Amino acid sequence: MTLASGDPAPLSASPAATEAEPPAGRRRLHRTSLGALALTGASALRLALQLAMLPILARLVGPAEYGLVSMAMPFILFANVLSDGGMSFALGRRQEVSRELEATVLWLSAGIGLVIAVALSLTAWPIGAVMHQPRLPWLIVALSPILVMNGLAAASNARIIREGRFSVFAGGDLLSTLTGAAVALLAALHGYGAWSLVAQQLALWVVKLVWVMANGRAALRPAWRFDEARELLKFGIHAIGSLLADYVSRNVDNLIVGAILGSTALGFYAMAYQIVRIPDMLITGPAYLYIFNAVSRAAHRPDRHALPALAVSALRLASAAFAPLFCGLALTADLAVPLVLGDKWQGAIAPLRWLSAAGFSFCVCALIGAFLLALGRSAVQLRLSSLLGGVTIVLVAASAPFGLAAVAAALALGVSLVCGVYVWRLADTLEAERRELVVAFAPAFLGVVAMTAVLLPARRLLAGAPPIVALAVMIVLGAAVYGAVLLGFARRRLIEDGRAFAKVQAG
């Protein structure tokens, strides 16, 4: 592969390629673009379902039980990063993959997942003793099969990514989310508390595994070509390292908050964080895969100037999509939380406002990470993710004694600064002008400034209105103002950015 040595390989933009796309390129463009749209649509439906389920489960489960599961999930998520050996994206970058190598990856990642699941189960009781939570070990053990399922799905995930069939992920996400929600609701109605959330996760992963393996069609045969898989493991080690650091930045704060402030405070914090992740899941998941696939293809072509331009397009499109969602969350948190979750969740309002800023920066960092991994720069991504994780641990540990709002504010500031480092390193990697990457955020910045300038006075005018009316007016007004700014100042550039990615996929 061109980038095996670490030098960024550029994108081709020959006149022939841009004037007449081959039929195969058009088919791939349509499949990949429609798949990304399907994945976005599935994410939107999943978002709607989560918004519908969130107040129901919040009322049925309660902050203490929710906080207990939030203590268990970081251990599962941490182990889950390791459970496929980093093989999904390592194999997904390959242009050609033998069936024997695919089968080797399947058995290797499944074995890794099984070993990690057993090890985590054995350490669950010491973890429970340290956390002073006697019920915690049983939750961890019950959730550990997720690790094996993730390992089994690695080869099929890689094939789907490589072929750009994102509609498969869309179908799996939607079906698994529906199943998990139904299971959680049924269990919660019968009074199972924290176990209803455990059942939700297990049901979700079982459906996702069956769907991905059935549609991914990865080779399921007795083959073992470890010498071929060795190179993938090298890439996977760096990818795992960056994912682990990303896990730390997104999950260790739960452990720190729970240990210092208790499970109820953690319930408020975890709920706020989950709400912040909803826009993240709606956009970042599909965008991550789309960018990874496009840049992986672009990285094998000869034009040295197209990759920096593609990075500018990615940042401009992503920031324009993320900014209004997180700004809107911050401005309407005090209206939305009591209305949607109930008065007992008032403690989630302050952390939600601050975490909205962190959520925007997390999304930008994730997409830059996709760019770096697709270029083969997994070592750079590892260093950046480690920086993000380290900053998160230090800031959350230092601010936790001062309360949830202090934790969220410190995290927002720290993650925003690290996001700037991500942009700086992306410019260095691509040998691009840093100013061009920074200016890519201008449409989102102008839109958010205008949106805030209009919504803050509107809040005062709506002070006597029913909360549901005030919230609806704020949402419609904010979307109208932000959309008008984008149409007025950046419509042509955003359209050109979309076409740039389309040309890459078609090529």
Image: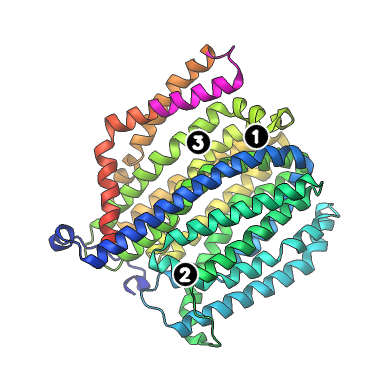
Q: Nearer the viewer, mark 3 or mark 1?
A: 3
Circle 3 SS class: helix
Asked whether 391 or 10 is in front, the reply is 10
Q: Which residue is under mark 2? A: 158
Query: Where's residue 221, x and y in %?
Result: 54, 85
Is-magenta flag for residue 382? no
Q: Residues within 10 Å of mark 1 (few under 14, many from 20)?
A: some
Q: Main secondary structure of the magenta part?
A: helix
The picture quadrant where one finds residue 491 is top left
Q: Which mark is residue 69?
A: none
In terms of sequence position, does the residue under pointer 1 or pointer 2 come before the other?
2
**Residue at the image point whose x is 71% and y is 47% from the top:** 185
Q: Which residue is under mark 1? A: 406
- Give the distance between the C-alpha atoms of the residues marked 2 and 3, in whole angstroms: 31 Å
**Residue type for callout 2:** Ala
Asked whether 31 or 402 is in front, the reply is 31
Residue 3 vs 104, above or below: the answer is above
Is-magenta flag for residue 471? yes
Residue 380 vs 90, above or below: the answer is above
Mark 3 in CB contact with mark 1 (< 8 angstroms): no
In terms of sequence position, does the residue under pointer 3 or pointer 1 come before the other?
3
**Residue at the image point whose x is 64% and y is 72% from the top:** 113
- Is there any visible trace of residue 16 in the rendered image? yes
> Quarter of the image containing the C terminus?
bottom left
Q: Which residue is under mark 3? A: 326
